[in-house]
Image (cartoon, helix red, strand yellow):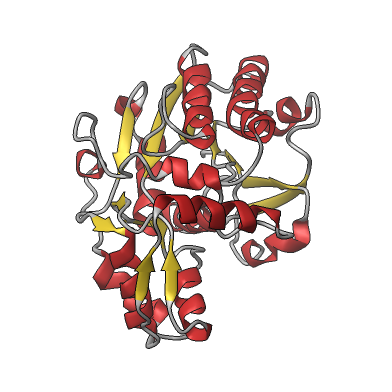
């Protein structure tokens, strides 16, 4: 009976993963432990029969060792899109290193880690460089590691297409930074299925999988589709690079998480698409869902 620890399990991808892990075991599998600092924000998982919420700060020294005890594998989904160099390093590099140390101390060998397409030590953004740092730490750990690199992930709870749809309900036009940036959106359920299949298949150990949908889009096209499918399509005005960076800098100064940062713009200098040099969803036996077969169903409810 498999027992899984899922870091970041209460988020967008984590929720879909927990649903699939429960379905995989037909409600009778081992416990799925979700550590969270704020259990009230993870109430939506309480209806899943084998999910156990545990109040914990995974960055607290020694905490991961205790959380890992008695589990067979761990999935790391913890990530941030915005932050300083120190924040990216803490979450994307130091946490995977701490996790590897804790796994060795607790006797848990199996890790599935979700990174990002474009992760590279020489990438143009802090986000992508830090993602590469986390991958390197896990590869050097000597543990049974599988890495997944998804493109931008869409689904009913996403903060991507839903955000663009909401903005077009209130704005007369869409001034858009990075309008020509390329993405290969992948459905959250396909990413969750990929994680489950990696957990089930020892042959995936040591592999890195690119998780991408069947079609590439420019960001401008994705914004237009989000507006069209939600019934509020507005003209999209691509911003020149200089104005885009000025806009992003101003957004960074607003309270809360910014809609766009200068580091996001740097990430978009690298096409967020599969390289074709690594195995993908098809090697896991997954036929990736198309964007237009899923997104209109949830955007059209707005």
Q: Which residue is pictured at 65% across the width and 45% down the height? A: 33
Residue 161 can be seen in this image? no
To which quarter of the image does residue 259 belong?
bottom right
Residue 87, position as x, y percentages in the image: 68, 35
Which one is nearer the viewer's eye here, 122 or 191?
122
Residue 26 can be seen in this image? yes
Q: Is residue 119 above or below residue 8?
A: above
Residue 34, position as x, y percentages in the image: 66, 47
Residue 90, position as x, y percentages in the image: 67, 30
Which one is nearer the viewer's eye here, 291 or 9?
291
Residue 298 relative to residue 67: left or right = left
Which one is nearer the viewer's eye here, 70 or 183?
183
To which quarter of the image does residue 38 belong?
bottom right
Q: Which residue is pictured at 41% across the width and 50% down the height? A: 241
Q: Is residue 130 above or below residue 77?
A: above
Q: Which residue is pictured at 25% across the width and 61% down the height? A: 289
Q: Which residue is pictured at 47% across the width and 85% down the height? A: 302
Q: Is residue 58 above or below residue 165?
A: above
Residue 54, position as x, y percentages in the image: 75, 47
Residue 282 relative to residue 261: left or right = left
Residue 62 relative to residue 130: left or right = right
Q: For the image shown, how many numbered marks are present on the structure? A: 0
């Amino acid at each position: 009976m498999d027992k899984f620890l899922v870091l970041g399990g209460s988020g967008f991808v984590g929720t879909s993963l927990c649903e699939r892990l429960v379905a995989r075991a037909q409600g009778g599998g081992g416990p799925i432990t979700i550590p969270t600092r704020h259990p009230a924000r993870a109430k939506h998982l309480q209806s899943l029969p084998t999910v156990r919420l545990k109040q914990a700060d995974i960055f607290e020294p020694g905490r991961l060792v205790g959380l890992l005890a008695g589990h067979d594998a761990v999935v790391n989904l913890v990530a941030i899109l915005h932050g300083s160099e120190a924040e990216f390093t803490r979450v994307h590099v130091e946490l995977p290193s701490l996790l590897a140390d804790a796994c060795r101390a607790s006797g848990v060998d199996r890790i599935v880690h979700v990174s990002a397409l474009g992760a590279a030590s020489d990438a143009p953004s802090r986000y992508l460089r830090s993602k590469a740092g986390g991958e390197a730490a896990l590869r050097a750990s000597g543990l049974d590691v599988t890495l997944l690199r998804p493109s931008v992930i869409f689904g009913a709870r996403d903060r991507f297409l839903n955000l663009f749809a909401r903005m077009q309900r209130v704005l007369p036009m869409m001034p858009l930074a990075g309008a020509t940036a390329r993405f290969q959106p992948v459905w959250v359920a396909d990413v969750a299925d990929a994680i489950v299949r990696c957990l089930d298949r020892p042959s995936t150990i040591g592999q890195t999988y690119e998780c991408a949908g069947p079609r590439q889009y420019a960001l401008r096209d994705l914004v237009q589709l989000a507006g069209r499918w939600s019934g509020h399509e507005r003209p999209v005005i691509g911003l020149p690079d200089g104005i885009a960076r000025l806009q992003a800098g101003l957004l960074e100064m607003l309270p809360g998480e910014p809609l766009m940062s200068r580091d996001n713009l740097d990430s978009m200098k690298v096409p967020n698409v599969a390289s074709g040099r690594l195995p993908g969803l098809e090697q896991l036996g997954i036929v990736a869902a198309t964007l237009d077969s899923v997104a209109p169903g949830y955007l059209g409810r707005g």
